[in-house]
Every structure is written in C-alpha cells, then in structure tokens.
Image (cartoon, rainbow, N blue to C red):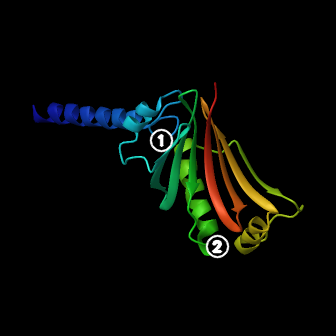
Amino acid sequence: MKQPFAILSAAVVAVLILAAGTAAAGDFRRAEWGMSKEEVREAELEAEPFGETELALTYQGEVAGVGALILYIFRDGKLVRGVYSFRIAGPETAIGDYRAVRSFLLDRHGPAAEEEIASAGSTEPADDDELLRLVLSGAASPTTTWHTEGTDIYLRLTEMDGNAAVEAHYLGRD
C-alpha cells in the first residue's frame, strides 16, 4: 500500500513543480505584454520600483550574477518592452559578464536565431582582449538575437560613454 502512495506523491510534487515553473515564466521576467503598471508591480514580487515615470518602471536586480537595472517600458499604459541594463564593474569583467548573461539567455530561450559581431573591420577578433578593444573603440558590437512566440530578444555588448555596456532588450510583438 505504501508504494502506490509514494508514486502518487512524487507525481503530485512533479506537477506542482512544473506548474510553479510555468507560472513564474512570462514574456519578460514574470510579466506579460499588455500588462498595466499595477499588474507588473504585482508580478515583480522581489522589490519595490527603484524609479518610476509615466512610461517606465525601474527595478534593481541581478541576472547570471551580474547586477542589472530592470526596466519595464509602457506605451498607452501597456507593457511593450523590457530591458536589462547590466552594470559592468570594469573592462576586466566586461567579456565575462557578457558571456554569463548570454549563457543565461541561451539556457532560458534556447539556441540563438542569429549571432554576429557587427564590426567596422572585416576580421574577427583574435581573443577577448582584442574583442574588448574593438568594442571600446566602437568598432565592434557582438549581438545575439532570439525570436520566441511573442518576443524578439537582442543581447548586445557595446560601448557607452567610454565603457563596456551589456544590454538585453525584450520587444513584444503585436
């Protein structure tokens, strides 16, 4: 008698785990495109907004061990875009942080639809130091793109104000 109960209990736990995982997934974090600011606040359980304007809610958080500003952007009162803007500690961590975030997104969204290094030159960087030099000079910007059912996702390593910057943009499709 104990064995069927144990099998049933394991099956119930597995279903609950799958249901919890599904409920936590959204178009951007736990939010769905078209949500209002109030609905996004409810979905973003971890913290209060760090900043708010008529068009955006901003949170602080972490993705793949990299600190990030998390922006929810609204048009006509509805969520249309999400952005992770990663805080890179310095040039020595830029490539590693980019790769950590890229790996996280690959795990979450599967194989990329496109990967490219938009470069002013025709040669591929020989190593990480060369890639960073090209990024900081504005001559290259590695980009990885995913297309999910209702979202286009763009991850870029780029130069911003003389520093390396990593951003992931989630764009809802109408």
Q: Amino acid at mark 2?
A: Pro
Reply above or below: 169 against 66: above
Q: Amino acid at mark 1?
A: Arg
Marks 1/2: CA distance?
A: 28 Å
Q: Which residue appears at 58% of the width and 43% of the height?
A: 110
Location of residue 122 in the rendering, given as x and y in whole percent from the top left corner: 90, 61
Residue 140 has which mark? none
**Along the line of sight, the residue nearer the viewer: 79 or 7:** 79
Location of residue 102 in the rendering, given as x and y in whole percent from the top left corner: 60, 54
Of all residues, the one furthest to the top in this rendering is 174
Location of residue 52 in the rendering, given as x and y in whole percent from the top left corner: 49, 44
Q: Which residue appears at 25% of the width and 32% of the height?
A: 12
Residue 91 has which mark? 2
Taking the image as shown, residue 120 lies to the left or right of residue 106, namely right
The C terminus lies in quadrant = top right
The quarter holding residue 139 reads bottom right
Taking the image as shown, residue 59 lies to the left or right of residue 94, namely left
**Along the line of sight, the residue nearer the viewer: 171 or 148:** 171
Of all residues, the one furthest to the front in this rendering is 54
**Disc 2 element:** helix
Label 1–label 2 contact, CB within 8 A: no
Of all residues, the one furthest to the left in this rendering is 1
Taking the image as shown, residue 44 lies to the left or right of residue 52, namely left
Q: Residues within 10 Å of mark 2 (few under 14, many from 20)?
A: some
Label 1 sits on residue:
29
Point out the tag, 1 or 2, that comes first from the N-terminus. Answer: 1
